Amino acid sequence: MTPVFALATSLMWGLADFGGGLLTRRMPALTVVLVSQLLAVGALGAIVVATGGWSEAGPQLWYAVAAGVVGPAAMLAFYKALALGPMGVVSPVGALGSVAVPVGVGLVLGERPGLLQVAGIAVAVAGVVLASGPGLGGAPVQRQTLVLTLVAAFGFGSVMALIAEASHTTTGLFLALFVQRVCNVVVGGGALWASARRGAPALPEGGWATVRTSLPALAFVGLADVAANGTYSVAAHHGPVTIAAVLASLYPVVTALAARGVLSERLRTVQAAGAGLALVGTVLLATG
């Protein structure tokens, strides 16, 4: 079941990133993050109440709190790096971080994938990097951009590792995701307030009317992100973290394919090759 849930994670993260990217063309990125997470908090709160998830409260929720603090900070560092440096360098390095940290944790905990799975990991990681469209030339990357990218990459991977430890039951998982999202809202709200204090716009040009008309799309982005965290936690608990992390990190392929299908964006040759390699790596991991 690990490959199934991990691939579902990639699908939902990829679609959430695609939807978030479209929304940020119409409104500030921080506003997209905050509103989508607020909607997710409302949905998760109702689920926690309905399932009696409060009974699962315990020390393990500190992992969810940490994930809720680290996640927005990583995303802000990622956006800043994208603004300062070449996206073709920032994007694949950021995606690779979501593989490296959980895989490292799995190896430290004693997981030892077989030879076929090791080959699958190598091929899939190469596919992720290529599918993100790495820049193969151009000006050197500034030190600040590189530092921000590495911070974001470590943050993305840390969130995956932390949320996998936040709960070991279904009802507890709902509670952990709720706590994580509440922390996301607190951190994101603070960042938006600070940004507005510096004069940056907190609302799109159309004001609240634009936000209201975008609520269905914002809800999709927030709930897809939540669902992806949940399916990743299930995948990590039912099989090797090393495999779950690699398969869950194929989301750049989904985002690229969604852009191709919806926006008619043409895949670069390197991206098409990356998608193919990611598929081959997935088959190797699933059969290994």
Image: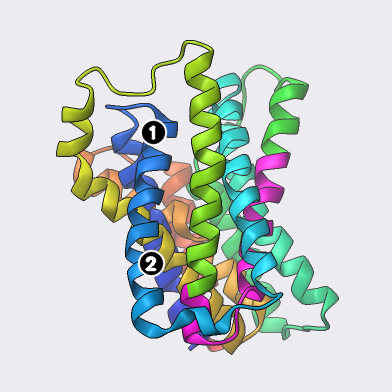
* Residue range corresponding to the magenta coloring: 151-174
Q: Is label 2 in a helix, a strand or a loop?
A: helix
Compared with 116, 80 (above or below) is above
Kind of residue at disc 2: Leu
The amino acid on which the numbered mark 1 sits, given as a three-letter code, is Thr
The earlier-in-sequence mark between 1 and 2 is 1
Give the residue at x 77% y 23%.
143
Q: Badge 2, how many Cα within 10 Å: few under 14, some, many 20+?
A: many
In the rendered image, residue 168 lying in the magenta stretch gets the answer yes
Residue 194 left/right relative to 272: right
Q: Position of residue 142 (x, y in %)?
A: 73, 20
Q: Residue 259: image x %, image y %? A: 29, 44
- The residue labelled by disc 2 is 44
Q: Identify the image quadrant of residue 78.
A: top right
Residue 275, label in figure: none
The quarter holding residue 279 reads: bottom left
On the image, which quarter does residue 264 sit in? top left
Q: Secondary structure at mark 1?
A: helix
Q: Which mark is residue 31?
A: 1
